[in-house]
Amino acid sequence: MRAAEPLLSLQGASKSYTLGSNVIRALQAVDLALVRGEIPAVTGPSGSGKSTLLNLCGLLDTADEGELLFDGEPLPRGDEARRTSLRRQAIGFVFQGFNLVPVMTAHDNIDYPLYLLGIPAAERRQRVTEALARVGLAELGAHRPDQLSGGQRQRVAIARAIVKRPRLVIADEPTANLDAQTAAQIIALMRALAHDDGTTFLVATHDERVLPHCDRALMLDDGVLKGACHAH
Ligand SMILES: Nc1ncnc2c1ncn2[C@@H]1O[C@H](COP(=O)(O)OP(=O)(O)O)[C@@H](O)[C@H]1O
Ligand SMILES: [Mg+2]
């Protein structure tokens, strides 16, 4: 049954970093299943392994041990070509610092990933216009990032992530640079997009105020996933 199958699952994923003679066990035997259309939060203090976990799920990095399945398909560590193509086609990213190109308008920032995918200009224009509207910025496509507020910049970054129509969006501390009210609005927007499109949004945050707006919370403690606690 495909519908019941998780979008992404990690089984026994471990990851260590070696610094000189020091081995840092960033993740230890993590089991995780992400369902379509949900927005789970990964929480835990700084250094608990949140970014390491998101980088594994975003196919930006590989585990030392364990298995990863995307859409039921095992993704072996060695298959870089498959991993890269899945990452480009099926995964969007939202970052703490927005990572917009400062000299490009909001419209052109959102357009860029579609241009890289080789999508024709007319279709790109239509999709960018739609993405701007969905994040509530229909009127602001011609603005550059420095002409937008922090919350508006993060909306542009979300539009850039969803314009590819990804299966999964990875958001690492997306609200860390925003005030509490704007942070709540940004998470609520992600949640609405997740529920409307069936896109999964995996959000790392150590902001307790964000948790009530997510579907569930996964607690990381020193690289160990402490299981789910209900966010609300
Ligand atoms: N590239 C790296 N090299 C060495 N150590 C790293 C690297 N990335 C992360 N770490 C270490 O792994 C642990 C988990 O880091 P991280 O996943 O960034 O946690 P978080 O995102 O929760 O702050 C920390 O002890 C961190 O110092
Ligand atoms: Mg981090």
Image: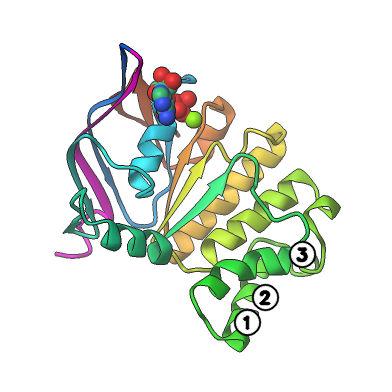
Of marks 3 and 1, which one's residue comes earlier in the chain?
Answer: 3
Q: Quadrant of residue 106?
A: bottom right
Percent x, y for residue 197? 45, 65
Mark 3 touching mark 2, by CB under 8 A?
A: no
For label 2, the crowd category at 10 Å Cα-Cα, with few meaning under 14, some 14 to 19 and many 20 or more, is many
At 33% from the left and 57% from the top, the residue drawn is 36
Q: Secondary structure at mark 2?
A: helix
Give the left or right position of residue 135, taking residue 85 as reference: right
Q: Is residue 44 visible?
A: no
Alpha carbon of mark 2 to alpha carbon of mark 1: how far?
5 Å
Mark 3 touching mark 1, by CB under 8 A?
A: no
Q: Does the magenta run of residues contain 13?
A: yes
Name the magenta segment's main secondary structure.
Answer: strand
Front one among 69 and 36: 69
Alpha carbon of mark 3 to alpha carbon of mark 1: how far?
16 Å
Task: Tell me which amino acid carries mark 1.
Answer: Gln
At 70% from the left and 62% from the top, the residue drawn is 136
Segment colored magenta = 1-20
Q: Quadrant of residue 4?
A: bottom left
Percent x, y for residue 101? 70, 56
Front one among 97 and 44: 97
Task: Tell me which amino acid carries mark 3.
Answer: Thr
Q: Does the magenta run of residues contain 3?
A: yes
Q: Which residue is mark 3?
A: 105
